[in-house]
Amino acid sequence: MLEVSNIDVFYGKIQALWGVSLRVDQEEIVALIGANGAGKTTLLNTIGGSLRPASGNVMFLGKKIAGLALPAIVESGIAHIPEGGKPFPDMSVRENLEMGAYPYRAWTRKEETLKQVYHIFPRLRERERQLARTLSGGEKQMLAMGRGLMSKPRLCLFDEPSYGLAPIILLELFRVIKSLREQGLTVFLIEQNVRHSLEIADRAYVMENGRITSEGKSKELLQNDHIKKAYLGL
Amino acid sequence: TTAPAKDKIVVGMSRPLSGPMAKIGDSAFRPVYETFVAEVNAQGGIFVKEFNKKLPIELKVYDDKSDTGTMTRLTEKLILEDKVDFLWPACGTHNIFAQAPIANKYSYILLTAEGGATSITPMLQSLPYLFISLSFSDWYQIPVWADLLAEKGAKTAYIISMADLFGIEYAGVSSIELPKRGINIVGIKSVPPDIKDLSTILKEAQKTKADALMVLAYPDAVILATKQSMEIGYNPKAFLGGPGVNFGFYHAIFGPATEGVSGFSMANRKTSPAMKELFDKLYKNKPEAANDWWGHPLYWAGYEFWKQAIEKAGTLDQKKIKDVMVAETFNTVLGPTSFKGGLMAKESHTGEIGQWQKGLFETVGGGKWPNTKVTAPFVYPKPKWPVPAPAKK
Amino acid sequence: MDKTTVLSKKPLFLGLLFLLFILFAFLPLYGSVYSVILVTAIFMHIVLTVSWVIFSGPTGYISLASAAFFGVGIYTSAILGKTFPLPIVICFGALTSFCLALFVGALTLRLRGIYFSMFTFGLVLLIQQLLLWYEVNITHTRGRFVIVINNATIYYVMFAILAATILTAYFISRSKYGLALQSIGEDEEASAHTGINVTVLKTIIFAVSALFAGAAGAIMATRWTYIDPFIAFNPLFSFMPVLMAIFGGMGQFYGSIIGAVIFAYLQEMLITRFPYYYMLIFGIILVVVILYLPGGLVGLLQKWRKGDLAEKHANT
Amino acid sequence: MIVEILDIVIAGLLLGGLYALIAMGLSLQYGVARVLNISHGEFIMLGALGAWFLFGFGVNPLVSLAICGPVTFIIGFLLYRTVFTRLRTSSASIGAYEGSSMLASFGLLFIIQSIALIAWGSGIKGYTYLAFPVNVGGALFAANRLVALAFAVFLGLVFYFFLVRTRLGKAIRAAAQDPATAGLMGVNINQVLALCFGLGAMMAGFAGLLISICYPVNTTMGLEYTIITIIVVVLGGLGSIPGSFIGGFILGLIGSIVTYLEPGLSLAAYYVLFMLLLLVRPTGILGK
Amino acid sequence: MRILEGEGVTKYFGGLAAISNVGFHVDQGEIVGLIGPNGAGKTTLFNLISAALVLNSGVIKFKGEKISGLKPHQVCRAGVARTFQSVKIFGNIPVLGNVLLGSLFGTSTGMSSADAAREAMESLEFVGLSTMRATPAKDLTLANQKRLEVARALATQPDLLLIDELIAGLNPTETAQAMELVTRIRDRGITILMIEHVMKAIMSICDRIIVLHHGEKIAEGTPQEITASKTVVEVYLGDQAYAGS
Ligand SMILES: Nc1ncnc2c1ncn2[C@@H]1O[C@H](COP(=O)(O)OP(=O)(O)OP(=O)(O)O)[C@@H](O)[C@H]1O
Ligand SMILES: Nc1ncnc2c1ncn2[C@@H]1O[C@H](COP(=O)(O)OP(=O)(O)OP(=O)(O)O)[C@@H](O)[C@H]1O
Ligand SMILES: [Mg+2]
Ligand SMILES: [Mg+2]
């Protein structure tokens, strides 16, 4: 479904990604783990279209998307839920969700999608009229996910959704991500919460210093000694 | 002594080509000096005996951005660096105040155009090189205006004046001259230059039922006051506006609605053949908006006077020319013209108060000076504003 | 950035500085009168710009109060000029500005960003209008003449003010207070929690910067011969320092000086050589500089030097 | 007494309508596109002189609305695409962008004004249109100001509903709060920001046109209006369109009250009010 | 000895009681954890202690003296340093400059610039950033920026350090390093009050834990007591299996 082949990404003259290749199949949950500053967000931003690779290719559903403008990428069915969620602070929960349905594809069916989202996150329905800036950290993260779903995506890119969340919300969060797949969505996930993400993911990639250093079935990676030592703190 | 060879007279000026003053400079002195220089040069220039030939005028104009600090610096640049032969004036009363001491310090004649105020008179003694051509309030327009009102039996007046030298001065003189003739001042309001709405003040004036409304302000406010008087249907028996009414653009804006509005005036085509010739020269092929029936003839006369003074002095020496300007009377477009104590003598004036009548700015009042030529009787009360004012097309 | 280059460059730099100092110190002796006048005006711009940069540069608080401080200096000088000797008049001008800035600074501590800018700009217009109203309705005058003094004296006074401004700016920027100001610009809250008395520091530095603008106004008034509220409190003097500083480049201390000099000179050239097209050309230059030299003139210089270095490296 | 108060209030509202209109435009440009557009007044001037110019050919000013509006919109839109988009993408931070875009708009002020100066000269211009009184409940008011007020209210409402109800309007508001994230929603940010700038310019054009019906105009009139606009925008709360709308009326009211009491202080009153408000409620009437 | 104590601490935001009538204390030399669901008021409590916010009622004492009512810089100089949940570093100032500001302005006595520089370098070495001292702070990775905040706080020579979510966004290995840093700070004799959502970390190093919920203190005790508390599990921890990493 998503195929990243051999991309290099630069910030000015500094290279952040070196020949990164990976693939995500239909209805898969794929996790990307790595240390701080490894380049995970950079990779996600490149797939999502906020950054352009200097070389290499990104294919989505058989079409080249590297270099396309952001709106076109969103239209093609990719939802990018950025680091920290970033809801629009001065819009209500509902308006935030409606913004998620901005692509034409989704706009016409937004009422229907809204119902689905409210079904997944009943908490958001309760807070429908509240301004996003006044939500708690967990609610903000839910709102961001809900907003991503509003665009009727085929593929969701999550950037550290568990950042700063209380344990009880964490549970909820991973449950929801898992349920997305059941609804026919594909998920590509960056997480520092390595154990949880590997537990819900089918496959995972490990990134170190801007390069993919290993990949595999997540169950296997959980047993891998290097991973255990470097990322699970065991 | 033989003067070094010379083939032109360089005249320097710092003018507000940009900034808020530009709109004044553009319509006031500029058309006059441009036409004047073109005419003099077409005749070959000014004959200067010292060089025994006619010298054409070359203008050197700088833009002071409407900033007085810049103006003072550019004035010194013109004098010191460019060593211009003559200095022509900056625009506006405050600039004359700032420029005059500098010109005087370097013994440069400064014959002003736009602006001037009575408060400079005490200083004229110490500024022998300063010559002011535009009229002041106290012994020019206001007494004449008061006479006109008194003659027609007006009893009350309401004054709106601008918060600056001009407004202070004219309002001050009015509150002396009008009561002298039995005309009561029932209200005086001073307004800041950028005022955007005069309707509440005008409504108050309307309530006083004053016979005459006087708007002693600059064009923006005068036009605003006219507009808003029309818009609220306020019809005083006499309406006097400060600088603004005398310009062609005033008529261009209001058309026939100007009927009966009074303003400051010097002359029109009917005043004399010489005046007719001047106005034809100045306004030929120009839109009506370019006309000015008050300042233009004065500035022109001033520089005609200046030219003759140079020819008489036969030199470009400022002091000698100044002495001639102080002493002599020359014939200009006004008639016999002279300066007294640095001010253009009132005897030279051809008019003081004008009034729009059938699209012409008639001179309706002047002092009892020899040059005065009243071209039409003062209409009182002025006709009401047309209601509704016809859109022009 | 190793020690040897710093050591080898320092004498050269100091020498250059000394040379410039000599050059300007004796200008009235060898230069034409007008060059003295022009340089005085340029000095004035530098003083206004550098004094603005002292506070606004590091903190990022865009003050538009320069015209107010400058104007207060001008009016002080116009009022006291006839009764007191020049040095006292200038000190008074500076002090009045200082006090005004203390007051305004203390009032506006809560305001950040654009709100601070707008407040300071409002201040200029408010003083202008109040003064106008006072003159028209209370004293029934408008404007006043200023005692004129000779150009060389004005020049030297301005030169002294300039030197004081630059030295003060330099030492503040080098001191721990300079660092603290910069931290305020980056994150005021964090600064406070790091132990910096943000309130006092901001207010004092703001007032110090006003000191110089006031002094410059006090001496400049004597060149202008006549002043009124509109001449003295001209909003242009609020915008100019900001424009000049950005034009020169705020990244470096000397950027504002370069900016002021070139900006002032450029203006002078345009209003005299191309008076009818001054605005057009000037506007185009502004837009082009902003578009193509994001770091200002200093940014360009640095790019050049970097380019040079890169080339050298490439060659070796 | 009652009539007098009514007079003052209505005069204030009439003036306020114009202020509201010019302020909404800048509010959009600053609130969304982050350009504190010092050349805003120049677009007002273009609208005003455009209407005056067309009036010379016998075009009814209300018809000119349909010409001046689109023209100023296009100029604004193109300027954003050429100048500000470039600045935005090359700026390191939003703060840096705000600084440099303000400076660039200063340059534009010079350019636009001098082109107009070369084309039309700096003299005072004007025309009369609907300059007659209308009887409103016993008091007389200028027909042209009533029209201007009606237009301001109408445009303000249309605009408000556009922002709150439409897809594009929502995108504009989202872009105002966080352009990068709005981009992630599929909003074409450059297009939307240019649109906002263009719409702001268009509002200025409309306002200029209405101003030209009420006041004498000239090519150097812009800056004065820019200052008033900025005051209104801050008064209402930066970036808040309804705030600007209300702020305009409040400033108009204050102006007419003080003009009635002591006209010499009417401008001073603006500034005092403005500064007090900044101190008491720095985020403006409707700001957050 | 009680180094920090609060009584009846209350803070309203409009109608919302972000902190209501909370009493708490921290003893000299302790590491105390502050936990609670998102929006419970933890950061708000930090803001009250460090005087970023003014409390509506109640009193906060540091070493027996009232500090509520002081200004932030005074609290800092009195010996309470803090870090921020969303990092607040001085991005364009080099790393060393960031820390130097702490030692120049934040210490109780004030020190000469040479001493301040020494102190700053020492703090940087302590957190392991000394090799990056010339880098502009904004170029550091998030983990390092958080460490820089700690170094800056340490440079003010505090007796009490408030740490707000040092670990969020770190992977387990980085978490372990951060925890080790915290213990080393305590070993220097600095008392620590820390907010954290990562239970494993909190449980392993805290002597005592305070739990906030809806602005109220709902539990307090040793890590064992807290994990055993039914209310805490209900509102905060959820399924124990996940509390681990
Ligand atoms: N805008 C930028 N400009 C320059 N360098 C950047 C920029 N953003 C990131 N980098 C650098 O690129 C590298 C990768 O950063 P990235 O944000 O992708 O890491 P990450 O794996 O997402 O880390 P984290 O876990 O902290 O989110 C880092 O060294 C970072 O400093
Ligand atoms: N300045 C403020 N104005 C209004 N409400 C605020 C403000 N600061 C915080 N709040 C609200 O107060 C409550 C407590 O916030 P606080 O930041 O203390 O939570 P927290 O416990 O630190 O949560 P988290 O774990 O997500 O960081 C929240 O509902 C928050 O929205
Ligand atoms: Mg990341
Ligand atoms: Mg928190």
Image: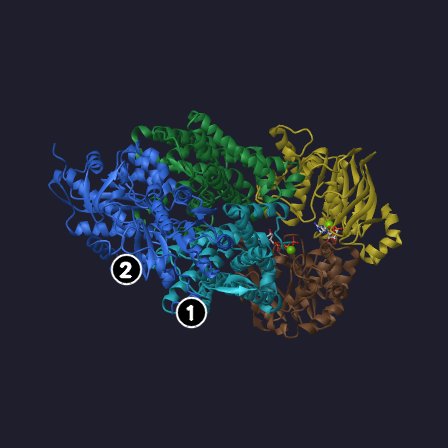
Give the chain letter for brown: A
Q: Report the coloring of the rendering.
A: by chain
The percent position of residue D84, horizontal first and vertical second, equals 48, 57
Tag 1 residue = D60
Colour chain C is painted in: green
Q: Chain of mark 1?
A: D
Give the chain letter for yellow: E
Colour chain B is painted in: blue
Count residues near mark 1 (Cα–Cα under 10 Å), then give few for <14, some for 14-19, many for 20+. some
Q: Chain of mark 2?
A: B
> As displayed, is residue C93 above or below residue B142?
above
The percent position of residue C49, horizontal first and vertical second, equals 46, 40
Specify the label residue C181 is tagged with.
none
Count residues near mark 2 (Cα–Cα under 10 Å), then give few for <14, some for 14-19, many for 20+. few
The percent position of residue D16, horizontal first and vertical second, equals 54, 57
Task: Report helix, strand or loop for mark 1.
Answer: loop
Q: Is residue A190 visible?
A: yes
The percent position of residue D80, horizontal first and vertical second, equals 48, 60
Camera-nearest residue between B225 and A79: B225
Q: Is residue C287 visible?
A: no
Report the side of E9 relative to A13 (left or right): right
Colour chain D is painted in: cyan
Screen quadrant of the C terminus of chain E? bottom right
Camera-nearest residue between C270 and E120: C270
The answer to whether tags 2 and 1 share a subunit is: no
Q: Quadrant of residue C79?
A: top left
Screen quadrant of the N terminus of chain E? top right
Amino acid type shown at disc 1:
Asn
Tag 2 residue = B286
Q: CA distance from mark 2 to mark 1?
A: 24 Å
